[in-house]
Image (tube, helix red, strand yellow):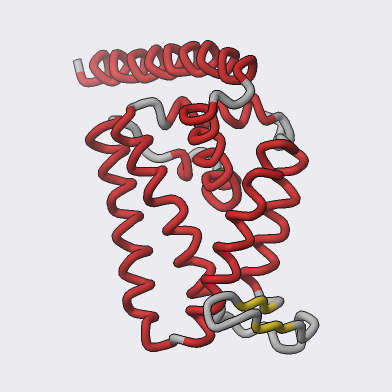
Amino acid sequence: MSMFDVRKQLTFYGAYHSNPINVLIHVICVPLIQWSAWSMAYRIPTKGLLPDIHYDINEYLVFDLNAAAIHAIISIAYYFLLEPTAAFLYAPQGIAIILSATAVGQNHPELFTYVLGIHVACWILQFIGHGVAEKRAPALFDNLLQAIFLAPFFVHIEILFTLFGYNPELQKHLKNDVGVEIARIRKLDGDKKRGQVKKSN
C-alpha cells in the first residue's frame, strides 16, 4: 500500500472504522490524544539536538521547536502530499493544537497528571469502540504509520465528508472500496476460524 495514495490509506482506515459509534468515539478522542501527546512531549529534552526557536504568542499559544513541533510539521506536510485541499483546511486546526498543547506543557506543568489522564482515557475509549462496536482490533496493530501520523487527518476528512459533502467523488469511491475491503477481511477471518475448527477436530 502506497503511503502517498490517499484513497488506499483511507480505505484501510475505513475498514477499521465503519461502525458509527466507533467513528464518533474517534472524532472526539483522536484530537484529544493528539493534543495531550503533544503537550506531554514538551518534556522531551531536545537541547543540543534542535535549534533554540521559541515564541510566546500569549499565555495560551506558544511555539517551541521541540519533538512535538517536529512531529506536527512532518504530519501536516505529509497531509499536503496526500490531499492538499483537505490539508489546507486542517492546517489551522493542527497549528492551534500544537500551539495550545505547548502552552499547557510550558506554563502549566502542574496539569501534567490531568493531561496524561485525558490521553489514557481516550485510548481506553478507542479500544472499547473497536472491541465492542467495531469488533475488530485497532488499525495501529496492522499499520503503525496510521497510528502515528494519519488518524487525526482521517478524522478531519471524515468530518468534511459528513458535514460538508467534501469531494463527493472521492467519498463515493471510498464507500465502495471500504465495502470491498471489509468483505475481504471478513472472508479471511472466516477462513481462519474454519481452519482452527478443522485443526481442533
Q: Is residue 199 above or below residue 90?
A: above
The residue lying toward the viewer, choosing from 154 and 126, is 154
Q: Quadrant of the N terminus?
A: top right
Seen as rendered, the residue at the extreme left is 201
Q: Position of residue 186 (x, y in %)?
A: 38, 16
The residue lying toward the viewer, choosing from 74 and 164, is 164
**Left of 147 or right of it: where is 85?**
right
Q: Is residue 100 above or below residue 159?
A: below
Q: Quadrant of the C terminus?
A: top left
**Left of 65 or right of it: where is 185?**
left
Residue drawn at x 53%, y 29% as measured from the top left = 164
> In the figure, residue 123 lies in which quadrant?
bottom left
**Left of 113 or right of it: where is 151?**
right
Q: Position of residue 102 (x, y in %)?
A: 56, 76
> In the figure, residue 59 lies in which quadrant?
bottom right
Q: Is residue 157 above or below residue 73?
A: above
How many numbered callouts?
A: 0
Residue drawn at x 49%, y 11% as measured from the top left = 180
Q: Position of residue 61 (x, y in %)?
A: 58, 75
Residue drawn at x 39%, y 26% as measured from the top left = 18
Residue drawn at x 29%, y 13% as measured from the top left = 194
Q: Is residue 5 above or below residue 103?
A: above
